[in-house]
């Protein structure tokens, strides 16, 4: 298993769902694919440098976890189906 860091940007425009519920939903999806989450950090709402898909800001959350390399593709594909996730980036930690 490798250690990863995922940056997820949530689209909070027009939703009444609490941020904590979205964070837990993503964490549950990762755990279903075999990831072991070691840390979650909600860095808050930030403005984008430029408008992206008619959005000017997003809620940034960083997940630190360990998983098999094959699980990353599955996690990415499953989270892509969630309309409240605007962006997702993954980084392998040393």
Image (tube, helix red, strand yellow):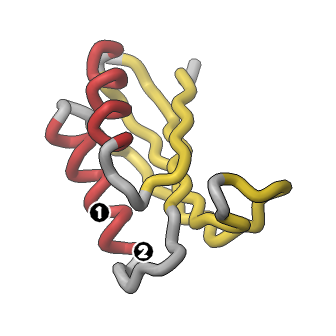
Q: From the viewer's perspective, tell me whether residue 58 is left or right of residue 40.
A: right
Label 1 close to label 2 by CB (< 8 Å): no
Q: From the viewer's perspective, tell me whether residue 44 is left or right of residue 27.
A: right
Mark 1 vs mark 2: which is more N-terminal? Answer: 2
Expressed as whole percent of the image width and height from the top left, the position of residue 19 reads 42, 74
The one of 65 and 50 positioned closer to us in this rendering: 50
Q: Residue at x 31, y 44 (%)?
A: 81
Q: Where 67 sits versus 55, above or below?
A: above
- Could you say which quadrant of the image residue 68 lies in? top left
For label 1, the SS is helix
| Other-residue count near label 1 (Cα within 10 Å), few / some / many at <14 / 14–19 / ≥20 | few
For label 2, the SS is helix
Check the picture and name the quadrant holding the N terminus. Answer: top left
- Could you say which quadrant of the image residue 80 lies in? top left
Q: Residue at x 65, y 71 (%)?
A: 45
Expressed as whole percent of the image width and height from the top left, the position of residue 10 reads 50, 60
Q: Residue at x 57, y 66 (%)?
A: 59
Q: How many marks?
A: 2
Tell me the residue that label 2 is attached to.
19
Check the picture and name the quadrant holding the C terminus. Answer: top right
Q: Measure the C-alpha gap from mark 1 to mark 2.
A: 9 Å
Q: Which mark is residue 60?
A: none
Name the residue at the right extreme. 49
Tell me the residue that label 1 is attached to.
24
Q: Residue at x 46, y 41 (%)?
A: 64
| Other-residue count near label 2 (Cα within 10 Å), few / some / many at <14 / 14–19 / ≥20 | some
Q: Where 44 sits versus 27, above or below?
A: below
The one of 11 and 93 positioned closer to us in this rendering: 11
């Amino acid at each position: 298993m490798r250690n990863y860091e995922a940056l997820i940007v949530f689209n909070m425009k027009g939703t009444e769902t609490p941020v904590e519920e979205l964070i837990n939903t993503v964490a549950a999806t990762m755990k279903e694919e075999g990831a072991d989450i070691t840390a979650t950090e909600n860095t808050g709402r930030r403005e984008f440098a430029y408008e992206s898909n008619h959005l000017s800001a997003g809620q940034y959350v960083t997940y630190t976890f360990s998983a098999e390399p094959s699980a990353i593709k599955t996690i990415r594909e499953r989270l892509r189906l969630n309309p409240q996730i605007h962006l997702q980036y993954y980084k392998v930690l040393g």
